[in-house]
Each structure stands twice: as C-alpha cells, then as structure tokens.
Image (cartoon, grey):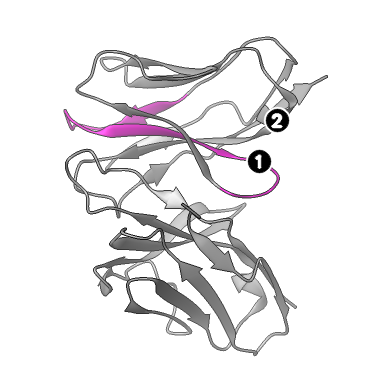
Amino acid sequence: DAGVIQSPRHEVTEMGQEVTLRCKPISGHNSLFWYRQTMMRGLELLIYFNNNVPIDDSGMPEDRFSAKMPNASFSTLKIQPSEPRDSAVYFCASSLTPGQGNEKLFFGSGTQLSVL
Amino acid sequence: AQTVTQSQPEMSVQEAETVTLSCTYDTSENNYYLFWYKQPPSRQMILVIRQEAYKQQNATENRFSVNFQKAAKSFSLKISDSQLGDTAMYFCAFMKPYNNNDMRFGAGTRLTVKP
C-alpha cells in the first residue's frame, strides 16, 4: 500500500496567490482529514470528509480556505488569497469508517507551505 | 473535554539505552483509544503504537511498548535499545470510539538519540 500521498511536498508562494494542496487517501479508506500543524497551535483539524461528503468544517479558519473531495481517491485544500500567517505544514490523513477497531488515522508526508 | 498533556518538551538518550516518554490525559469516558505517533525530520506522522482502553494488556510493537495506567490516566511510551533513527518528535493522542474526527494531540516531546 502506498499510504496517503500528498503533493506538493513544499510550496513557496507570494501573498495573495492561490495555493492548492492535493491528497490521495489510502485505497478503501472512506474518511479523509485535513490538518494544519504550527509551532504555536500544534495539530489542528481543518475539515473532515466521510464518503466524499464534508461532515465537519468548523476548523477551517476563514472563507479563504476551501476543500473538496470530488471522488474517493482525491481531495484538495485551496487557499485563496494566501497570507503569510497561512505558512504551516498541512497534513492529509485517512481512515476506515470508525467502529470495529478502525479508530486510527494514517497521515501523509505533509506539505510545507511558505507564504512570503 | 478531553485533553492530552506531554510534560517533557525535550528528552535525550544514548544509543542502545532505554527511554520513557510521559503522557497523561483527562477524560470522563470509559472506553477510548490512545496512540503514540512519531514525526521524524522527514515530517511524516507515523503511527507507532495504539492502545484500546478496555484492554488491560499493554500494547507492544517490537522495541516500543506502553505502560497504560487507566486509573491514573497515564500512557507512557518506552523505547528499548534506542536507535539513531528514533530521533523524532513523539505525539501522544486520544480518541473516543466512532470519533475519528476528534483526535486530540499532546504538544509533543522532542527525542534525540545520541551516538
């Protein structure tokens, strides 16, 4: 199994530009999560999809952030326009439907975003 | 609300020795899951070990084992025969059943294994 695949690994952009982060979950997993990691706030859940449907987006910081999951094997997190305070590591994670011992998350390698 | 506390921001250990990382949590739940994740310099979050609260037996994975004390709400990670590749941030995490979208993480412990 290839695991959760994220791209790009690094992204450097200028303030005001649009940024799109991509994620391919583990095949067969029907839950997908976007997290943001910063030194100050640690790991924060931004949004959670189940069966491609956004279930909880209460962690999305502002309207500048949006996420989609058009099919079971692909998700995007978009920031438009980007700001320097968006600089962080963004993780995608996936899991099976919770229950029957499926409570565990598998993370991708993250995207290091730097907004100048 | 559930909280996870890691009181050791940084630790170090000599190669081949044993080290224990501490984690405490606060919950009123009786059944839940606890995790240790490793984040090496490569940045990926890697699941090291998982414990189900209703199981009294401590989980083990090769050189990694936990000391789960449910009454004390303590969940420490022991790394035996430390290797240079164990150098990483280690995060303790808590999750209630059926709540994959509510995993609570501690602040992390930075472990350095010295040659």
Q: Is-magenta flag for residue B15?
A: no
In the image, what residue type sits under mark 1?
Pro
Q: Residue B79: which quarter of the image? A: top right
Q: Which residue is mark 2?
A: B85
Q: Position of residue B28 (x, y in %)?
A: 19, 31
Q: Is-magenta flag for residue B27?
A: yes
Q: Position of residue B65 (x, y in %)?
A: 46, 17
Q: Is residue B79 above or below residue A78?
A: above
Circles 2, 1 touching at the beta carbon (< 8 Å): yes
Cα separation between marks 2 and 1: 8 Å
Q: Position of residue A49 (x, y in %)?
A: 30, 68
In the image, what residue type sits under mark 2?
Gly
Asked if residue B17 lies left or right of residue B106, the reply is right
Q: Is residue B79 above or below residue A50?
A: above
Residue at the farthest front position: A1
Mark 2 falls within which chain?
B
Q: Residue B32: which quarter of the image? A: top left
Precedes in sequence: disc 2 or disc 1: 1
| Quarter of the figure that contains the C terminus of chain A | bottom right
Identify the disc placed on residue B40.
1
Q: Which residues are magenta?
A: B23-44
Identify the disc placed on residue A50.
none
- In this rendering, which labeled residue sits more in front, label 2 or label 1? 2
